[in-house]
Image: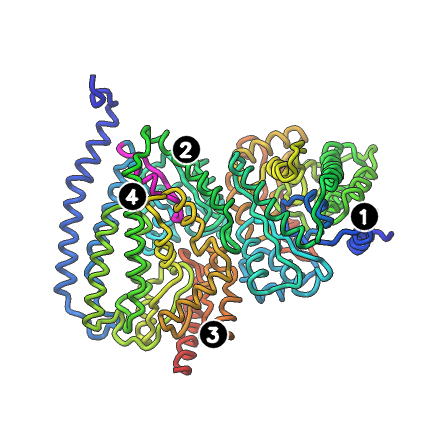
Amino acid sequence: MTGREALPHYVESTRLQHFVNYEVVGKSALRVQRWRDQWKLATRRPRPDSPLSPPLRCVAYMKEIMSRHYLEGRYAAGVRKVAWVTSGAPTEPLQALGYFLVYPENHAALCGVRRKAQSIAEEAEHAGWSRDICSYARTDIGSMLSGKTPAGRLPRPDVLVCCTNICQTVLHWYRVLADYFGCPLVLIDTPFLFHEAHEHEVAYVKRQIEDMICVAEEIAGKSLHEKRFQDVMANARRGAELWLEILNRSQHRPAPMTAFDGFIHMGPIVDMRGEAVVVAYYERMLAELDERIDRGIGAIKNERYRVLWDNLPIWFKIGDLSKWLAERGVNVVASTYTYAWGELAPMIDPDHPLDSMARVYLHPILNRSTGHKLESMKRMVDEFELDGVILHSDRSCKPYSLGQIDQRDRLVKKLGVPALLLEADHNDPRDYAEEQGSNRLEAFVETMEARA
Amino acid sequence: MSTVAGHAPSFPSRREVIEHVRALGREVVAVMPIHYPRAMLRAHRLHPIEIWGPPRVPRVEGSRHFQAYTCDIVVKATSFVRSGGIAGTKAILVPHTCDALQGMASVLGDFLHPEQRVLTLYLPRGRRTSDRDFLREELQRLGAKLSEVSGHQPSRADWMEAFEAEDAADAALADLYRRRERLAVSDRHFYQVIRAREYLTAEQFCEAATAVPEGNRPRTGVGLMISGIVAEPLELFDQIEALGAHIVGDDLACGFRRVYSTSMRNDPFERSASRLLKGPPDPTCGTPVRDRIEALQTRMRALGARGLLVYDPKFCEPELFDVPLLRKHLHEAGFPVLHVEFEMGETLPHQTLSRIEAFVETLS
């Protein structure tokens, strides 16, 4: 008897669905959609009244890649093992073991961009979760309870992997998921770095990654293949390097892309880090940015002021803010948030995967001190020749936000850079006061004008 | 020796404790909540005095550094530090309890630069062998810093003396909880003694604990379990009694969650690590919510609690995530749950009391 004959009927059925709906119909339909998008982008006449340059052509590819990822998710259960992971989790071994990865944070952000987050988060609030907890968590818990999602359907996890290098919130959030789904939760606890990492901290993280691999192998029913693991690590490193190069292209004047573009285009490096398609996509994107630089095309038509964005974006306001600022000649050319997925690229060593992973996953900006973040901002102000800094005081993300008041004071008083603390939330529109926000941004622009 | 005013039990004030420990050749360290190695501080000739967001300190100074959505414990403690409240102490130790305390430690160390050294301690969120091994090394790192602060390198005898004293105080704390039903004191009195552990020496605490009288004090009305971080102001307990209820047990971070099991390991750092990892369920330590629920159910049944009052300071994420599941599962087990959030202040809002009153009525 062959292994195939031994498969239960429902596995055959899910495999068939996966093959037909994803491999054949889905992929083809998304390719056609991409051609249509490309055609639209190529033939659309630029609006003379728009302060923004036409979008990057590669956005059509990104849309295809991300849509394909979410589409596969709909049919992944029963075909591939599924892991739900935090955005800072060490996923390379899971990639190498063939897991399908779901990033609840990215899913929540998708809900935010599509302006569905509030109604989905309310499902969690009705079930008792407080509005004072992270709006990503509320969005995903609400989606889990109600099934509501703009992504169609998320596959049920076989395992949850939670890494605390972005916040402690994720641990509490994933405990709720583990309770609901009744599946194993693997914790990668990363000590917060007030200063440089100590060896015992690196060793602790490495040991936990090794433990995670054991659990993942057991669930997957196969062993991690060393060569495959190294390939994934090499792709992860190349993808992160390219992403960093892409972000650094905005050091040019005019900057060929905005940080708002960066928030959208970071999807592949977050969701599919380690896959070859990410490397191919970012090579394409980099080439297009270089073409823009050669032709002197900026992301906004009249770049007068260059600004840094600190913290997560306000997902439900990305388009509006981008346009509002561009109308005033403000290009948000860099962000501390998008940098987090690129700046550690040099630390990734495919020849020493576990050691380097332990170091990489200890060092995201969110796992480092408020003083380190200030130094990063100062460096970016210098390297990107910035005129101001917008610090998004994000009610939902306390580890990113606490410290911003002192960071802002030092940017203003010691560096002489105008800096604005903008009160909002990354996913909950109820925590953004439109009028107040506009007034503060207006005053911020006036301050930069006065200094010009 | 003066005593805390009113109908409070009699034990030394903070000022007297500071004078006392200095006379013993120890320096004082301010400590933020929740878990930390007490014996280790003592072995280094240091004495901890805890800061839980002093109630009579205005938020103003702390609000200059932290956003409005930051918990009161952090904002008020920062105000306290900035207004000279910990003057004369050698260091401030901030255990990594949550994102908010992480932010506080970072802002203090990077920007506010108090005259005291800012010490940190990362507490692992699991209970695995890797967590215990890590914590042991993390405590060793902290130990080196403590030696720098105190100028004292503990001898084996120092360690033994410190463990003996602190284990005795831990045992006295556990014993208080064991004897709770037989104690002839009000809930307020009981928690004044429990919370005196936050600043008394181990010996003073043992004395205060054994001085709590036993006897017949009929307890009428509805028995409640109280959960959360810290129950303030203490007037809360008077009001609960006035509403016809009483506290039969707690799951408070400032209370029962610090009833640690004693460890007898030889290595002092391993022993300290083992103690810290052997506490009751605590969401700030990453305890799975089911474990917490099971522990609560068992204790509530044993103690005769009719309902659970979850009493939290605003913006406490570790607590807030658990609340809906606590409510759901405990309700299914026949224990109604009331969740109340409060802002640390001197008075108890009428609205809070009304909610507790309605809750007690439903249980009566």
- In the rendered image, residues at marks 4 and 1 fall on the same chain: no
**Which label's residue is closer to the chain start, 4 or 2?**
2
Distance from Cα at disc 3 to Cα at disc 1 = 53 Å
Over which residues does the magenta segment extend? A79-96
Q: Nearer the viewer, mark 4 or mark 1?
A: 4
Q: Earlier in the sequence, mark 3 or mark 2?
A: 2
Label 4 – label 3 distance at C-alpha = 41 Å
Label of residue A232 in the image: 4
In the image, A302: left or right of B143? left
| Disc 3: host chain | A
C-alpha gap between disc 4 and disc 1: 65 Å
Q: Is residue A414 above or below residue B120?
A: below
Which percent across, then down, holds residue A447?
Answer: 43, 79
Judging from the image, mark 1 belongs to the subunit labelled B
Name the element at disc 4: helix
Q: Which residue is mark 3?
A: A415
Q: Earlier in the sequence, mark 4 or mark 3?
A: 4
For image coordinates 34% across by 36% down, the residue present is A156
The CA distance from mark 4 to mark 2 is: 26 Å
Query: How busy is the neighbourhood of tag 4: few (under 14 within 10 Å), some, or many (20 plus)?
Result: many
CB contact under 8 Å: marks 3 and 2: no
Vertical side of B280 occupied by B46: above or below: below
Which chain letter matches label 4? Answer: A
* Residues at marks 3 and 2, CA–CA distance in whole angstroms: 50 Å
Q: Which residue is mark 1?
A: B8
Q: Which residue is mark 2?
A: A183
Q: Residue B119, position in %: x, y?
A: 61, 54
Which secondary structure, mark 3? Answer: loop
